[in-house]
Image (cartoon, helix red, strand yellow):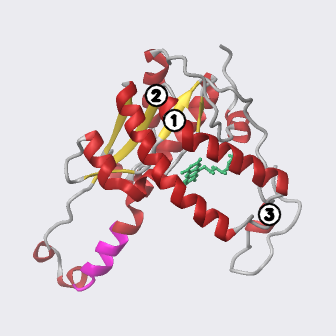
Amino acid sequence: MAEIGLFEAMYSARALRRLKPDPIPEELINKLLDAAIRAPSGGNAQNWIFIVVREAAQRQRLGAIYRKASDEVAEIYAARGRPAHMTEAQYKRLMDGGSHLWDHLGDAPVLLVPCLRKRDMPAIDALPPQVAARYDVHLAYQQRIFGASIYPAIQNIILTCRALGLGTTITTNHILYEAEVRLALGFPDDVFSFALMPIGFPLDQPGPLSRRPVADVTFSERWGQAWPAGIGP
Ligand SMILES: Cc1cc2nc3c(=O)[nH]c(=O)nc-3n(C[C@H](O)[C@H](O)[C@H](O)COP(=O)(O)O)c2cc1C
């Protein structure tokens, strides 16, 4: 198939949650993984592991966990209500697509689970005193940026799916039942999952994406100071 441009991919890679059950050729799965590992990671640690789940029983098991977690998340969404920037139609599309996935995640031919292996911190007494004195800040910092070493890879997977004519979306609800996911996938203690991505050939069309305008989400130099209108693509 013809390659699409980077901007076309970025501007049209919307969440595609209705997927055909047809299997995905292994060559395409390998392309997704090969694109994923081109992403940046903190300290270039590349401490990622990707679990490709194709066995039906395993997919259904993860699908059931996702369903259980999503039932709870649905209540949070309902209590929170529609975000102000979304129209009724946009919100309905999100909710309809989301609830379809609650019932069908396990039917996607591939579930991809991007994970990270936790990196050890050096012992406090191996550090100079001025850094050791702020060890707790460093621990909190490591905790805060942990997922930042896998989410760029996940975006590469999303864009590559778009380029290859596959559909996917990032989902995270399963993390509410992480212990069950760990058991299902047999994780060692230092490995954590960050997403559960259903992948398949899509029933719906990609793009265009609807987003809040740049002027609404950008400040110039400091908080509250408008970014000049008219700058941008
Ligand atoms: C951190 C994160 C977690 C998400 N978790 C879920 C999820 O559990 N289930 C789901 O259906 N979509 C999930 N999404 C997808 C969002 O709903 C989607 O990106 C957003 O609605 C924009 O959709 P669009 O690109 O089709 O416009 C998640 C997205 C992000 C970035």
The location of residue 226, given as percent across then percent down, is: 80, 75
Real-space CA distance between mark 2 and mark 1, rounded to the nearest whole angstrom: 6 Å
Dots 2 and 1: beta carbons under 8 Å? yes
Q: Residue at x 33, y 47 (%)?
A: 181
Residue 122 in view, yes or no: yes
What residue sits right under mark 2 in the picture?
Answer: 110
Number of residues whose C-alpha sits closer than 10 Å to that of mark 1, classed few (under 14), some (14–19) or many (20 or more): many
* Quarter of the rendering occupied by the N terminus: top right
Please name whichever residue, 53 or 68, is drawn nearer the observer in this view of the structure.
68
Between 83 and 140, the one lying in front of the other is 83
Tell whether position 141 is magenta. yes
Question: In the image, which disc is placed on residue 42?
Answer: none
Check mark 1 vs ligand 1: CB closer than 8 Å? yes or no.
no
Q: Which comes before the other along the chain, label 3 or label 2?
A: 3
Give the structural element (helix, strand or loop) at label 1. Answer: strand
- Residue, disc 3: 85
Q: Amino acid at mark 3?
A: His
**In the rendered image of this protein, does residue 99 appear above or below residue 18?**
below
Residue at disc 3, secondary structure: loop
Front in this rendered view, residue 175 or 155: 175
Image position of 152 with respect to 130: above or below: above
Q: What separation in Å lies between label 1 and label 3 (alpha carbons)?
A: 27 Å
Q: Are marks 1 and 3 in contact (CB under 8 Å)?
A: no
Residue 198, label in figure: 1
The answer to whether any part of residue 45 appears in the image is: no
The x and y percentages for residue 86 are 79, 59
Which image quadrant is residue 170 in?
A: top right
- Magenta residue span: 133-142
Give the residue displayed 41% in from the left and 63% down from the top: 145
Residue 82 position in % (x across, y down): 75, 64
Q: Residues within 10 Å of mark 3 (few under 14, many from 20)?
A: few
